[in-house]
Structures are given as C-alpha cells and as structure tokens.
Image (tube, rainbow, N blue to C red):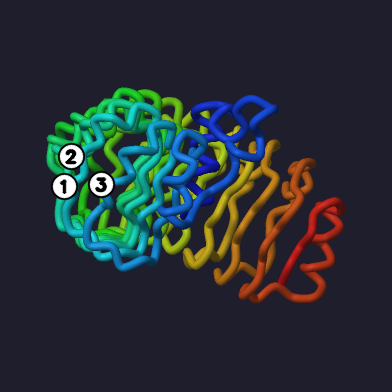
Amino acid sequence: MQKLFVLLLSIFLGSSFLLGQKSNLRELNKTYTDLTEALSKKEKVFHLNLSNQKLSSIPDEIAQLINLRSLYLSNNDLKDIDFDFSQMNNLELIDLNGNLFKNIPVKALKKCKTLKALNFRDNLLTKVSKEINELSNLMAIDLGDNQIASISDQISFQNLQFFRADNNLLSVMPSGLQNMLKLRELNLSNNNIVEIPKEILSKCKNIKKLNLSYNPILDFNALKFCGKLKNLKLNGCNLREIDLHIIFGMAKLRSLYLENSGLETIPGTLSKMVKLEEFYLSNNRLENLPEVLESLKRLKYLDLKGNPVSTLNLIKIQNAVPKAEVTL
C-alpha cells in the first residue's frame, strides 16, 4: 500500500514529491524506520515509516520533523489521534492502513493543511460523514476493506482524483461523487451496488479508470457517459447483451476486464475498440470470438483462461491477433 500511495502522489503532485532537487536525491528518497535515528537528523527526514510497531498513539516527537512529507503508520493499534498536526507544514501523505479506527478523526487530521493523500484501508469504519469535507485538499483517499455501509451524500472533495472504497457494504453509489469533477480513478468493487446513477457519471467526465467488479448491478447504461475511460473492470458482474453493446462502444478503452461474468458470446461491436491493448475474459463460457477481433490492431494481451475454446478456434483467434499474447 505504501508503494501505491507514493505512486499516486508522484502522478498528482509531480516528480518533485519523489525526487526534489537532484543534489539531495538520496536524502529525499530515504525512508526512515527508526524514530530515534530520524530525530537525530530532523531537517533531513522526508519519509518516516513506523508501521508494524504496535503503536497505540502517534509519538509527539514526530512534530519535530518539520520537513516530513509522508508518514506511514500502518498495521499498528491506533484507535484515535491525539497528535497535533498543526506544525506539519509539509506533510502530504498519511498511511493508517490496518489499524482500529471506527471513525475518521477529522478534527485531528484537518490541522494538517497540506494533506493530499489519506489511507484508511482495513480499519473498522462503518460510515463516512460529511465532516470529512474539512479535509478539503485531499487528492487521494483509500477507504477499502472496511465495513462501510453509508457515505454521506454531502461529500464534495473538489480536488479529489483518486477514490477507493472497495470491499465494503455499500448498496448505492455515493451521490456526492458527482461533486468530484476532477476524479480520475474510482474503485467501488466488491460492494452491493445495484444501480449506476447517470447523474454521477455524467458529471464525472474525467474518470479514466473505473472498477465496479463484483457488484449486482442491473443496468450499465450510464457507462456511455464515461467518454475518457481507458481502464474498465466489470469482473463478476451479470452482463446482458445490451450491456455489452454499450461497453464495446467505448472506443477509448485500453484495458477491459470481464472475467467471471458468464459470457457466452461477444458482439460484433467489439470492432469499435480499436485502442484496446488488454482484454481479460477468463472463466466465462466463450467457445469463440467474432471475426472482427482482427480489428484490434493494438491488442497485446488476450486472456481466455477457463473458457471452452477448442484448439481449432484458438488457432483462428491467434491468427486474428498475431501480435497479441493469447492465454488459454
């Protein structure tokens, strides 16, 4: 998870987050894992990782690290935050993955005015209230692997680009998502979502990566509003023929995941997906693919594992996309 958030910030905040000035490259990239050592070099500490140390509170001494930019506190025993972030004027990332939080401690976190990325994955959260809006500078938040059944409709992160709330108990897509006009990546997989409101996707026009896998969604018509989408994951969804025509009409897609979806056929509208590079169709009921497959000139990888494709049909498929790696 640490690598994920560092990668996100390197994209969102620019290479300076990771590299800084070339003359200080080694110091800027170093992540300290011992607080005593870090305190001996206070002004030279930019990244501190105190994960897996059975912490029940955040050490007050961390406030002395005035240039700290990322703080990793995953897999500890934290339930609340008493730490004063008001002097941490450079801190942009806080990782609290794998702790014991039942609520997001907004009162403490909002004192960190420079906070851009927040990781609350694998805690004990059951809801997200509107107070989280006070963390107004967030660009990335991960709330996955919790027990969240509701997210306030009033959330309105104006700067958020990455939102993850997979593996929760959500039955509806949070309507507040429509306020996140800069959203680029959305992951709501493994929930209980039945409907994709067009009001949300019609306003989130900048989404490039969408994961709605393993939800009992009944209608995918709203996907037609995702004109900039490049990566779509609908694994484990019950797809109908009408849904497939909508999906295969998304000409800008580069990666498409339709694994474990009960597919028996692929419509000819597949020919519109001329930019597709990765196509994942494992564990379906496909015996063959349409001849228009040859239209996918950019295809690099085709996953057909777990499908009843005959040897003869496999040869036809391989001949149709000779530059692609085909697995069966």
Compared with 176, 159 (above or below) is above
Give the structural element (helix, strand or loop) at label 1.
loop
What residue would you read off at disc 2? 108
x then y, percent, for residue 196: 30, 43
Residue at image coords 22%, 62%: 56
- Can residue 221 be seen by looking at this rendering? no
Give the structural element (helix, strand or loop) at label 2.
helix
- In this orientation, which residue lies closer to the viewer: 44 or 14? 44
Depth check, mark 2 against mark 3: the one in front is 3
Mark 2 or mark 1, earlier in chain: 1
x then y, percent, for residue 267: 59, 50
What residue would you read off at disc 3? 60
Residue at image coords 50%, 51%: 32
- In this orientation, which residue lies closer to the viewer: 197 or 219? 197
Give the residue type at disc 2: Ala
Q: Are marks 2 and 1 in contact (CB under 8 Å)?
A: yes
Compared with 14, 187 (above or below) is below
Mark 2 vs mark 3, CA separation in Å: 13 Å
What residue would you read off at disc 1? 82
Mark 3 or mark 1, earlier in chain: 3
Question: Can you tell which quarter of the image residue 317 is in?
Answer: bottom right
x then y, percent, for residue 125: 19, 57
For the residue carrying disc 3, how many other residues have a C-alpha within 10 Å: few (<14), some (14-19), or many (20+)? Answer: few
